[in-house]
Image (cartoon, rainbow, N blue to C red):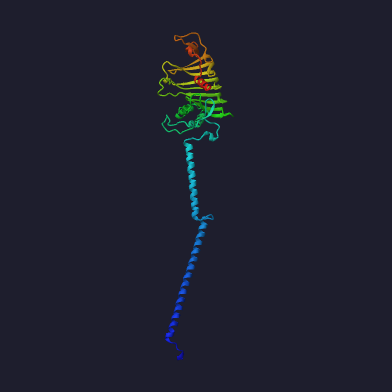
Amino acid sequence: MDGHKLNKKELVPIIALLVFIAVVLILCAVSAGRDADARENTAAWQEEAESQEGSAQEETGPEGNGTEGTAAEETEAKEDSTQEGNAAVMEVKKTIELEEDPAETGTQAEAESVAPVLEREPESAAVSANGVSQNDAKPVVKKTNLEMLAEMMDYWSKGNVEAVEDLSRLSHYKAMSASLEGPSYFYYYGDRNADGKPEGTGIAVYGENQYYYGQWMNGVRQGEGTWLKMYDYSDRDTKADRARISHSYTGSWQNDLPNGEGHEQYVIDPEKAEAGSRYLQNAMGNFTNGLYDGKMYLMTQDASGNVQEWYGNAAEGVFETFEGRDSEGRVPICQDAKNPDSHLWIRPLDNMNLGITEVREQATAQKDE
């Protein structure tokens, strides 16, 4: 037994080796535990990420994630908002300024300039210089010539001549008429034939505050219609006879002139008439090319407002005269309807071309151009 007993010095290396092995085993065990924890954490993270991704897909749908869907919706909303804003501006512009081109609306009834051949209305004249109303000093909404003529035609077709006269006194209607070079030019609204010329029923505005509403044929006034002139006096015109308010003719037309039965009328303001003056108020009977022709019925009005009725016979603008001559060289032409011995007197040189002078001058100017 003593022979097999180990020496203490011999045990030291063995013990050191065992300790070393134990330390190595402990370190391996610790390292293995850390790896397992890391794998478990990684798996947990992956499961959590997959769970969140699945929830996001359910919320945003199959087309993309929540961020992309929100951005797309915001972009579409902005585009829709921009388009709606532009449409609102266009609508307001059309509603307030009313500058749309009549040709774009598809209507055949357009305002055109005629001199005397039909020409399209220039763009510069499409909208009259409206400005401020002389009646109430309030801004006036701009209207095209087409819209103004359509408005006036509506009243005229219903027989509301008073409304027509009121419209003609407005500043923008005056501006529309003033934009024409003279009484032989006009803007037209109404029916047309295959060649585009006025034919049927229509309305026209001429220079110098003149209007016509009625029937047309091949570009000229023909049939039944009414011509109207509104007198407009400026403060600088000191020589004008301000007693005349308006002048009109209603009746038959042919070849752009009064031909046939008709009624000429002046509206007179007696308060502005000169003392001792007498004015023609009405002339009814037959007209030939705008001249009195046949038996005529006349009415006159003096500065005091007194009205007298007369009968006379005319031939192409010249009245038959009765015997006699007064101290001023005037001759009697018409008899008083109530007293045949009383006559209407006129100077011989004035007894010619009697009729609707302004319409005749208008038609003559058209033929000369």
Report if residue 84 is visible in the image.
yes
In this rendering, is residue 31 above or below 90?
below
Image coordinates of residue 147 in percent, x first then y, are 50, 32
Image coordinates of residue 144 in percent, x first then y, are 49, 32
Image coordinates of residue 19 in percent, x first then y, are 44, 79
Closer to us: 149 or 118 = 118
Report if residue 344 is visible in the image.
no
In this rendering, is residue 332 above or below 72?
above
Q: Residue at x 49, y 66 (%)?
A: 42
Q: Residue at x 44, y 78 (%)?
A: 20
Closer to us: 139 or 113 = 113
Please identify the residue farthest to the right as the structure is shown: 194
Instruction: Answer with left or right where residue 271 lies relative to residue 225.
Output: left
Closer to us: 310 or 217 = 217
Image coordinates of residue 221 in percent, x first then y, are 55, 24
Q: Residue at x 45, y 80 (%)?
A: 17
Q: How many marks?
A: 0
In this rendering, is residue 38 above or below 333?
below
Instruction: Answer with left or right where residue 193 lies relative to residue 164.
Output: right
